[in-house]
Amino acid sequence: MPRLATIWRLGVKELYSLRADPVLLVLILWAFSFGVYGAGSGISHELHNASIAIVDEDRSQLSARIRDALLPPQFQPPELISFAEIDPSLDKGRHTFVMVIPSRFQADALAGRQPAIQLNIDATAMMQAGIGSGYIQSIVAQEAARFLGTGSAAAPVGLETRIAFNPNLESGWFTGVMEIINNVTMLSIILTGAALIREREHGTIEHLLVMPVTPSEIMLAKVWANAGVILVAVALSLWLVVERALAVPIAGSIPLFLSGVALYLFSSSAIGIFLATIARSMPQFGLLLMLIVLPMNLLSGGMTPIESQPALLQHLMQAVASTHFVSFSQAILYRGAGFDLVWPEFLAVAVIGMAFLTVAGLRFRRSIAAMR
């Protein structure tokens, strides 16, 4: 039976070892501060400051209204160019969008002949191209309807949109919080795995083996010490970076979220222990880390919704604790869900975590036995 006092003292030793490792300390600091802030403020999924040019061969009141409707912050002020400048402009990357308004555009519109506007798009800027084309199509349709006096009466059905949880569709509200969630998985695996490999490389694991401690006590000490560091870093990152620096409102209970993080950390830390028993050096551990962490972050629902993935992959990812962790984290932080709604996800994380911890413990025990 593991002794709590021994686990506590071994965990304190782990904290001293971590304090003496400046590389890992800088990684933790960067991941939960500048990494989160950069993801929340630097990565934007909205159309912003897109460059657009117009070839206005009509020079009419309607074409001027369309040009004046392309306003900041979505677009830069439109530049008037000639037809011969279209290809050079797109080839050199000066403009993402080039709109060609043909001659007699206004006259044909007034006559009901439905004239067409050509929109040339540089699709190498893929996100701006996809979002911007929709913006431009909507702007052109609205300005034409207002000019012709048709308004919106021609639409047989009116769609009243109500956007919940993120009414302004600010991508920073999503990316900043998700960066914390992804970093929890990455750092918990790195810290616990690196702690074990560091013991092996420095030869201090042999010192532990001659002491009256069991492999379970050694493993649990590494898990709680590194999990505790990450839990404190998550709490500070939510408070200082997300709520203060990025001004992202947190809808739900932060103590409930941190309780879920603590529960999940036992599962992800066990993965770090397991990988460290397989790898013989830090470079090998880094390669294994890429094979595990990247798929977990990509397929757990943080970047791609689970329901958008193939059915087989959806079923497979239900056996991974990070899927349930992302699910209840989003429910608590974005939608303000209480424990009555997220307890099934907490239970799934606990069951999967115990399974991972058991497997990692058996593997760690074998590796310790082989060294004696």
Image (cartoon, helix red, strand yellow):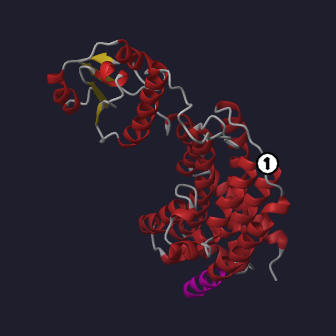
Q: Is residue 15 left or right of residue 306?
A: right
Task: Looking at the picture, tell me which residue is in the foreground, 236 or 143.
Answer: 143
Magenta highlight range: 361-372
Reply above or below: 96 against 366: above
Task: Give left or right: position of 209 versus 21.
Answer: right
Image quarter hosting the N terminus: bottom right
User: Left of 194 or right of it: where is 100?
Assistant: left
Residue 285 picture location, percent across and down: 47, 67
Quick check: 297 above or below 94?
Answer: below
Q: How many marks?
A: 1
Q: Quadrant of residue 89?
A: top left
* Residue at 53% across, 37% down: 38
Q: Is residue 297 visible?
A: yes
Q: Name the residue at 53% across, 34% down.
A: 154
Q: Residue at x 32, y 13 (%)?
A: 60
Residue that protrudes farthest toward the left in the picture: 84
In the image, 343 versus 264, the foreground residue is 343
Q: Tag 1's secondary structure?
A: helix
Q: Position of residue 202 (x, y in %)?
A: 53, 66
> Magenta segment, principal secondary structure?
helix
239 versus 147 height, above or below: below
Taking the image as drawn, is residue 95 in sight? no
User: Which residue has dot 1 on it?
Assistant: 254
- Residue 358, position as x, y percentages in the image: 68, 81
In the rendered image, the vertical position of residue 1 relative to residue 156, given as above or below? below
Task: Kindly identify the residue that appears in the image at 56 percent across and 72 percent down.
Answer: 314
Q: Amino acid at mark 1?
A: Ile
Query: Considering the image in quadrants, where does the C terminus appear?
Result: bottom right
